[in-house]
Amino acid sequence: MLCPQQPEASPPHAGGSFKSPPDMHVHTAFCGHASGTMEEYVLSAIGLGMMEMGFSDHFPYPEDFTDPVGGCVIPRGDFPSYLSNIRELQRRFHGRIAVRTGVEVDFLPDHLDAIGRALDAVRLDYVIGSVHWVNGTIIDYSEEKLKSALGELGGREGLWRQYWETLEKMVQWGACDAVGHFDLPKKFLSMRDYPMDMNAVDRILDLMARKGLVLDVNTSGKDRSRDGEIYPSPAILKHAARKGIEIMLGSDAHSPQQLGRYFSDTACLLRSLGWKHCVSFQHRIKRHHAL
Ligand SMILES: [Zn+2]
Ligand SMILES: [Zn+2]
């Protein structure tokens, strides 16, 4: 696709005059599966011309949830240090870049009271809600793990059906500002020969529009999904644009080098679909940025 401001496909980090919109989906080494110091992430954002960025590392699991995998989220005892590190970076880089305090929370339908209480106990700029667990299976951890659980989930069809049901419940829940990587099950399952259930997609997008939830346009899919496609797919984005849903950009960086990946091309796609702005958050309030 041709873009008026970027005539050629750009590499993951396009140089030149492109001023990057805020990257609001960024992890840290606290979660146990990301690398680099938090300062390196901020410096990477500044290097890309961002005026704002947000850390959104994996929120600790509730006490009554037994994590069968390990190393997926910030351990509960480390969460205060995550927050104080962000506060320190906010002070140090004040005037150069605004650093927001966010989390990516796992939607676990049987633990919502505990998760809600834990979220209420901290002052956050925003919460990304994500469905990584479908009926007891973590769907984005490894291809082997997903494939071995697929029979129990009712195959591909069963997985997608339960994923949409769970995602819809999360949107209803009301504790999140944004919906993370909307069509995550495609990470290890190609969609090339499989029809997306657009009825379910539309139902959830309509609900998001009513509740004012923001869509995380997550560029990690370019590197990490089977079909090399962002989350959500351009087909879903078209529907979201028509419904007037607001978007934020997220690289889902797990290393400082991944920050802002593919943002230039993605901003171009989003503009072509009609969006003029993306959002960031401060104290749970949307802030708008030109795309
Ligand atoms: Zn992660
Ligand atoms: Zn995620």
Image: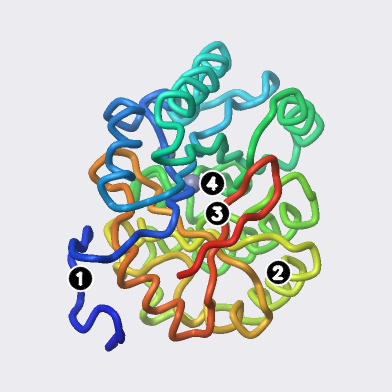
Residue designated by label 2: 204
Q: CA distance from mark 3 to mark 4?
A: 10 Å
Q: Position of residue 83 (x, y in %)?
A: 54, 22
Residue 166 against residue 104 in the figure, above or below: below
Residue 208 against residue 73 in the figure, above or below: below
Q: Residue at x 50, y 43 (%)?
A: 138
Residue designated by label 1: 10
Q: Amino acid at mark 4?
A: His
Give the mark, 3 or 4, whose residue is nearer the N terminus.
4
Residue nearest the observer in this picture, 252 or 11: 11
Name the mark on residue 132. 4
Q: Residue at x 40, y 75 (%)?
A: 191
Name the secondary structure under disc 3. loop
Q: Is residue 103 left or right of residue 23?
A: right
Q: CA distance from mark 2 to mark 4?
A: 17 Å
Q: CA distance from mark 2 to mark 3?
A: 13 Å
Q: Quadrant of ligand 1?
A: top left
Q: Nearer the viewer, mark 2 or mark 4?
A: 2
Name the secondary structure under disc 2. helix
Q: Amino acid at mark 3?
A: Gly
Q: Position of residue 28 (x, y in %)?
A: 39, 31
Give the mark, 1 or 4, whose residue is nearer the N terminus.
1
Q: CA distance from mark 3 to mark 1?
A: 24 Å
**Quadrant position of residue 211:** bottom right
Badge 2, how many Cα within 10 Å: few under 14, some, many 20+? many
Q: Nearer the viewer, mark 1 or mark 4?
A: 1
Residue 87 against residue 176 in the figure, above or below: above
